């Protein structure tokens, strides 16, 4: 990413999820939450990037890694990120993992774990923090959702 210490002094990974109106869109949302809860990245507001909020864009640009998650080949999240001229990111499309897009919001734990593993590979080339039992399907109350020091934006 660009030399911009907007996020914080430490290494930071931002996760941007499409959160669309299908199972695969909601899988991106749930996985982003779970990775945040597990301390493996910060789930960040894609709508703020799409809304061209300069502080939020600067926060993403200042981070070490960005993971963009799209549910399907429509690539809505990728298009939002590219429209904001953010070009250094890892990218994952959930349907590319063999998960069919349907209008059903009962997410399977198997699919969530499959996507979490794929995200870890995309970010690290390995499957670190194998034990995600603490984070599975937990509400975001345990997640900080914001940058507490040095951030440009108080909204996660």
Image: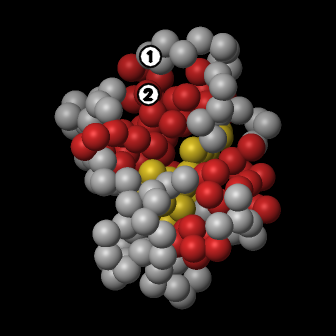
Looking at the image, which residue is at 41% across and 20% down? 110
Asked which secondary structure carries label 1, the reply is: loop
In the rendered structure, are the residues bearing label 2 and label 1 in contact, judged by CB atoms less than 8 Å apart? yes
Residue found 79% across the figure and 37% down from its top: 74
> Left or right of 99: which side holds 124?
left
Between marks 2 and 1, how big is the CA–CA gap? 6 Å
Residue under the point 48% across and 69% down: 153
Percent coordinates x, y for residue 48 in the rendering: 62, 57
Crowd band around label 1 with a 10 angstrom C-alpha radius: few (<14), some (14–19), many (20+): few
What percent of the width, then of the height, locates residue 47?
64, 51
Residue found at the far bottom of this picture: 3
Instruction: State the count of labels.
Output: 2
- Residue drawn at the location 77% of the way across and 52% of the way down: 79
Within-10-Å neighbours for mark 2: few <14, some 14–19, many 20+: many
Q: Nearer the viewer, residue 2 or 47?
A: 47
> Tag on residue 92?
none
Helix, strand, or loop for circle 2?
helix
Answer with left or right where residue 9 lies relative to residue 25. left
Quick check: 132 above or below 153? above
Q: Position of residue 35 (x, y in %)?
A: 37, 45
Q: Is residue 5 above or below residue 115?
A: below
Position of 111 compared to 147: left or right?
A: right
Q: Which residue is mark 1?
A: 108
Q: Could you tell me which quadrant the N terminus lies in?
A: bottom right
Vertically, is 152 above or below 119? below
Point out residue 14 in the picture as x, y percentages from the top left corner: 48, 60
Which quadrant holds residue 142?
top left
Q: Which residue is mark 2?
A: 112
Q: Which of 43 and 48 lies nearest the eye of the viewer?
A: 48
């Amino acid at each position: 990413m660009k030399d911009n210490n907007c996020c914080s002094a430490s290494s930071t990974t931002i996760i941007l999820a499409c959160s669309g109106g299908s199972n695969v869109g909601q899988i991106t949302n749930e996985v982003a939450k779970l990775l945040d809860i597990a301390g493996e990245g910060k789930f960040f507001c894609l709508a703020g990037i799409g809304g061209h909020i300069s502080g939020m864009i600067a926060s993403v640009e200042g981070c070490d890694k960005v993971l963009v998650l799209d549910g399907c080949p429509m690539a809505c999240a990728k298009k939002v990120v590219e429209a904001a001229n953010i070009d250094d990111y890892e990218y994952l499309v959930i349907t590319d993992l063999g998960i069919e897009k349907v209008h059903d919001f009962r997410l399977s734990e198997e699919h969530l774990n499959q996507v979490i593993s794929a995200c870890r590979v995309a970010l690290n080339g390995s499957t670190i923090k194998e034990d995600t039992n603490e984070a599975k399907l937990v509400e975001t109350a345990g997640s900080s959702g914001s940058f507490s020091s040095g951030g440009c934006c108080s909204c996660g």
